[in-house]
Image (cartoon, helix red, strand yellow):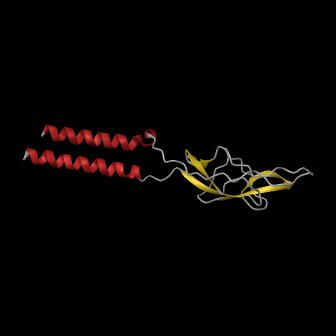
Amino acid sequence: MKKFLKRLMLGVVTLAVFYCMTPLAFAAEKYHTIYLEPQGGIGVPTQVYVYKYGDVYRASSLPTPTMEGYTFDGWYEDIVGGTAIKASKYNFKEEGQTLYAHWTVADGSSSSAAAAQPEETKPTKTFKIEEHMGEVLIVGTTILVFTLVALHG
């Protein structure tokens, strides 16, 4: 009977570990895809990734497009008007948000066109143990308790 209980406890512990660790493998990504509409400008990707910092999504910087005969004024929420975006201070609202380039006609000087558009790269998925300490402590405590119960019996 003791042998059966030990095997039963080992099976329960194995299932508990599998059940607790599986969500970590399929955890939601910690970034949003933001689309860029250069409004005739060149030299920027069509999308960028903004990362989650606490409860908000922010970007450290945004690419700067170029357009001959125009000066880039910045990225804005709306095609005409809207709020100017300061990447490191702006809280991106949702997945799939589009930012629009605003331009001013240059005073006779023309800027050179940028080379080919940069290649878009998707960020690699990283696992940080400190973001999952709660789950680790629960799994560790559960394993310890079941192991002690199984060995004691």
Q: In which quarter of the image is residue 145?
A: top left
Q: Which of 69 and 74 is in front in this view?
A: 69
**How many numbered tags mark residues here?**
0
Question: Residue 44: percent from the left, percent from the top?
Answer: 70, 53
For the C terminus, which image quadrant?
A: top left
Left or right? Give the position of 129 relative to 19: right
Residue at far front of view: 115
Left or right? Give the position of 50 relative to 13: right
Residue at far right of view: 108
| x 39%, y 52%: residue | 23
Residue at far left of view: 1
| x 35%, y 48%: residue | 21
| x 24%, y 46%: residue | 13
Question: Residue 77: percent from the left, percent from the top?
Answer: 71, 57
Question: Residue 106: percent from the left, percent from the top?
Answer: 88, 52
| x 50%, y 52%: residue | 29
Q: In which quarter of the image is residue 38?
A: bottom right
Question: Residue 9: percent from the left, percent from the top?
Answer: 18, 47
Classify 81 as above or below 88.
below
